[in-house]
Image (cartoon, rainbow, N blue to C red):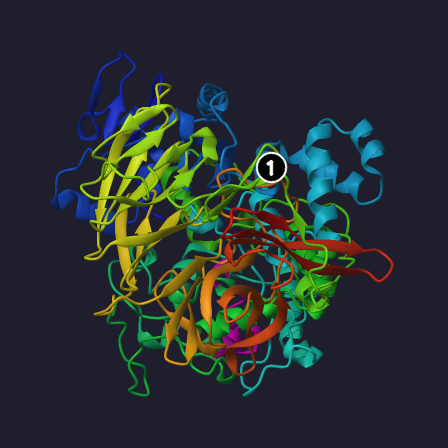
Amino acid sequence: GLDSVESLMIVGHTHVYLIENYFHCVDGNVVDMDDAPRELCDPYIQLIRPQVASRTKTRFPKLHASRSWPLASLSCISRRKFLLRDIGLEMFFCDGASILITCTSTKQRNAVHAALAGHCSGKGLDRELGAAFDISSAPLHTIQDASAAGAFLSSRLASAFLASAAVAAKLLDLTHKWRHGRLSNFFYLMAVNTMAGRTANDLSQYPVFPWVLADYDSEALDLDASASFRDLARPMGAQSDARAAQFCERYHALKSFGDAHAPPFHYGTHYSSAMIVASYLIRMRPFVLSYLLLQGGAFDHADRLFHSVRKAWRSASCDNTTDVRELTPEFFYLPEFLRNSNRFDLGTLHSGEPVDDVELPPWAHGSAHVFIARNRDALESTHVSRRLHLWIDLVFGCKQTGAEAEAALNVFHHLSYEGAINLDGIVDEVEKRAMIGMINNFGQTPLKLFLRPHPPRLVYNAPDRYLAGMDASLRRLELHAGTCSPHAVARLEYASGMWVGRAAGSCGDDSVLVWRPDASRAGRVFGTLFVGGAVHVNVHLAAVSAVLPVGDKRVLTAGVDGTIKCWDASAADARLVLQTVWRGHVHAVRALVHTRSFNVCISLDNHGGLVLWDVTRGRFVRQLVAPERVRVARTVSVSNDSGCVCVVAAVKYVNALTVYTLNGDALVRAAVEPGEVSSVAFAESRPSLVDAPPTDLLHVYWGSEFITVAYSLPRRVLRVYEMRCGAAGYAVRLAYTYDMTSLMQAAVTAMVVLKETDFDGEECLVRGRVSFVLGDARGHVYTY
């Protein structure tokens, strides 16, 4: 965000604490910020804090809110710049939380970094993102040397000549994976932004993404036509020749003055700033608060708000010489920012029309989900993949500064660049305030990562467009020896390099073995669980109906009484420590599913009710599907890649398949083949298991979701449905059918479906394939 608060940081033996509005004096005393010596306080906090925030804080006493995190949950820390000063530190935790702190000096920041670095576990952080954080913490000259060498030398030769071989290897590895189709365009841009010091915790250095489309007028979007796309080789100010000529004339006019203190520039505004980000995301909290801080506590005139995608494109590309803005990552994954769900009063346009949801292009058919999906398809398209390196050169590379920037019409105000000014060297407070205001509000150019032209991508397709082997029969189905059990497989786990089937009410992930008593045995005790070798009674007031591990030695249990409980099972003596109790069902809970990527759980009861829970905070989020009056057969699955939730319900003569988002929006509803459904699963790059099989293909973009539905009656059949967003919106089609009657001894009761990708060097393609892990009603586990 934009608002900042002075805090006291305490690094303890087990936790790190931040307590707001306290000051640690040189004599060791801790005092309220209002009583702290002004000459010892951070002068930059007062200079950048918006006036509206200052007025608000004078009306009410300063609060001493505190936050704490276990050091064991610290995943990564990364050095950051703030106001172009090397004083920031960003901390990332394994539950997804992150925070940006600034210190009074680089020396103090380095001391804090040294105190915390030894606690970083890397837990919950994938390898590519961790590499990007490591690169962003390296000295700038080391990164530039790595990029320069990596563009032309082999990794071995580059490492021999670099100050940091590790940085070179990580940078080369990220670029190599992107070029060979192992990283999507979206993920690579996020990695490049991260390496360049951009972060979502600082709106003045928010990640920047390109406009990729130029067609916001057609009824149907044609991603095979080059006219549908913007020119990625040109900055936004040069998308048309006429506009480019205007900015070129301005540059030469400023250059003719010969003022060494005011170098010439093409653009007096920037492509990314706090105001641009806040205006794009104005319909969501907390960004609306940041916008109001910038605007003095009130919304701007409605005609100047972001209310139309088409008008925003026209303004930035041709109509407005003071607007050259690019996009934010949300344009490619978050439809909610386009809708005014909070019902903010954003005013009325000059035409008399009230500003509400963002006006979308005709080809989006009024759906924010369709717009986001098609915009993401455009970002990952062949056309953009062939040219994305040209845009990287403009923003992060060789055309960012110098003669190449001048030739590319890509020069911005000199104060937006790294090293342009030393704020600590300015004595006059009025001048310093003006410089800080310009840097904080105008926008900051990212660090220059690449000194040479960025190499192009070698493959241009999404793997689901080149599926290999999906139309073949499952004749290579293999039975895993030693995995048979007397019970039907309800859950599949990966342990000791092999797949294992677990019966209902049991789990063995995370090195914690938990199971309930066999329901068929007489004399069983309701609410009893076995944890390792220990017996726990009265876990629930009724029988335990489901058990699910969610990581960090935590286990969820559900009961016939409708409650769900979260337990800490990390104790060495196999004790269960109750953390939270969740209440949202009035019927017996039948199943629990979990996604580690989003850390949410979905519970299903006997009457078909579906409830979404936040596992991190232990809170009820929403009811996805209301329960029926009578018992109903529903099966549920959640995608660890996209967060989509698939529900298959048995209705008269047919099955109804519905796909929801985590925010409760129904993306598609379709009638699928009738029959008794025994299991449903999304195809995923990485399954939502605590212990998952190793894979190196977590960030490959598949344009489609593949949903596998297992039927037990009238025949044992697997049907694979493809869900894709096309020109008319989302649709589901039957892609493949596999008859399992002669291949398996019993019905499929549990599935893990994996997306896999191969690089075809001869044809420069990535080919996708889907593999299956199947558990049946007789306790067998099969792989294909």
The image quadrant of residue 448 is top right
Q: Which residues are magenta?
A: 310-330
Q: Is residue 25 left or right of residue 382?
A: left
Picture residue at 17% right of the left edge, 37% below the top:
62
Q: State the residue at coordinates (24%, 48%).
A: 53
Whether residue 424 can be seen here: no
Q: Which amino acid, by three-letter code, is at mark 1? A: Gly
The question of residue 203 being in magenta is answered with no
For the residue pair 571 and 168, the one nearer the viewer reads as: 571
Residue occupying the far right of the picture: 762
Identity of the residue furthest to the front in this view: 522
Q: Is residue 425 above or below residue 646?
A: above
Query: Does the image show residue 208?
Result: yes
Question: x and y percent of residue 180 in the render?
Answer: 75, 53
Q: Residue furthest top?
A: 27
Left or right position of 627 against 670: left
Q: Decide if residue 542 is on the left or right side of residue 600.
A: left
Total residue callouts: 1
Horizontal and vertical percent for residue 263? Answer: 61, 52
The one nearer the camera, 71 or 702, is 702
Q: Residues within 10 Å of mark 1 (few under 14, many from 20)?
A: few
Kind of element beneath mark 1: loop
In the image, residue 543 lies at what x, y percent? Answer: 25, 44
Residue 316 spot, x, y in % from top left: 53, 71
Q: Is residue 422 depicted above or below 771 in this figure?
A: above
Classify 536 as above or below 739: above
- In this rendered view, identify the residue nearer to me: 33 or 63: 63
Residue placed under numbered mark 1 in the picture: 482
Residue nearest the observer in this picture, 601 or 282: 601
